[in-house]
Image (spheres, rainbow, N blue to C red):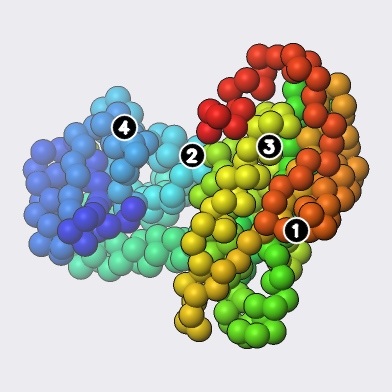
Amino acid sequence: MSTALNGKRRILIAEDDRVSRRVLEVFLTKWGYEVLLAENGKQALTILEGDSAPRLAVLDWMMPGMEGVQVCRRVREHADRPYIYILLLTARSQKEDMLAGLDSGADDYLTKPFDAQELRARLHVGERIVDLQDQLIDARDQLRFRATHDALTGVANRGVILDALRREWARQVREGGSFGIVLADLDHFKNVNDTRGHLCGDAVLQEAAHRMSASIRAYDTVGRYGGEEFLIVVPASDSLGTLGLAERIRLAIAATPVATKSGEVYVTASLGVAVSSNAQPFDPQTLLQLADEALYRAKDHGRNRSELGTPMEAPGAEPAQDAPVKSGSR
Ligand SMILES: [Mg+2]
């Protein structure tokens, strides 16, 4: 965070000379910063590597133990952390020194004795850079979210949920065990769109996705597979466990009508379940096909129900490993 809870920007001053440190502290406090102080390079590094590091730092070059440029180099090793704008203060005025300072990863430097207004102006430049950096990261995160999530419902998109399925299959091939999938399709959804309009249909899809997400375990994934069809990947689960999850989802969707702007809409779902186990492994494509067939059987048998599309495991065939995820335990 570049600002503290009180809205002030936080800044570190690292300066071994007590008088200079005090002068800097007075100026920066007057200019509205929340000031953190370090008396040497080691203290400065501890603060800058900490969880709530300030995003601006003024480092004296010459300090006992660890010099400002060394602190700078160490901070720059953490490329994954939020960017810290670093201004070096130095009594040295020769050009080579300045170049060495910038080479260590400092953003700017100022020679002592410094002009207060110049320091202030340069810190404003630092604030702009830090803000731009944050905006870029925000924009990148938003793009990343949009690229991986369904825009309407917020669950994983088709590409991501199919990746999750392929990953589970790869894991099973590598490590054994079993996993399941659930294909869920809202019943008579076309009627909702036709009689209530598409905005109402969208609201129903959003609420259904929300209820599915609330019914799964932390390590399961819900994705939008098609129009009103959702795919749930269920790691480390056997037939009973996956059927149990499908039933939980079915009940959550049917339990109460969805409140929309055009009134309450009763909606149900039909669900097809398929499980791949050591004894009966199915690759992703086959598993999807079997779940799809089970889903159509659920539709044929009257809708608002779950059907298993793969053979139930023989009793005791998949011991221990699947025990914690049976339906009763979640
Ligand atoms: Mg010094």
Cα–Cα gap, marks 3 and 1: 21 Å
Q: Position of residue 236 (x, y in %)?
A: 68, 29
Of the two numbered discs 1 and 4 on the same chain, state the one appearing first in sequence.
Answer: 4
Cα–Cα gap, marks 4 and 3: 48 Å
For the residue carrying disc 2, how many other residues have a C-alpha within 10 Å: few (<14), some (14-19), or many (20+)?
few
Pick the residue in front: 127 or 106: 127
Of the two numbered discs 2 and 4 on the same chain, state the one appearing first in sequence.
Answer: 4
Of the two numbered discs 4 and 3 on the same chain, state the one appearing first in sequence.
Answer: 4
Q: Which residue is mark 3?
A: 242
Q: Which residue is mark 1?
A: 302
Cα–Cα gap, marks 1 and 2: 58 Å
Residue 228's place in the image compared with 68, above or below, is below
3 and 2 marks in contact (CB < 8 Å): no
Name the kind of residue labelled 3 in the image.
Thr
Residue in view at x 90 percent, y 43 percent: 286
Q: Which residue is mark 2?
A: 78
Q: Which residue is mark 4?
A: 46
Q: Mark 2: which secondary structure?
A: loop
**Would the CB of label 3 be found within 8 Å of ligand 1?**
no
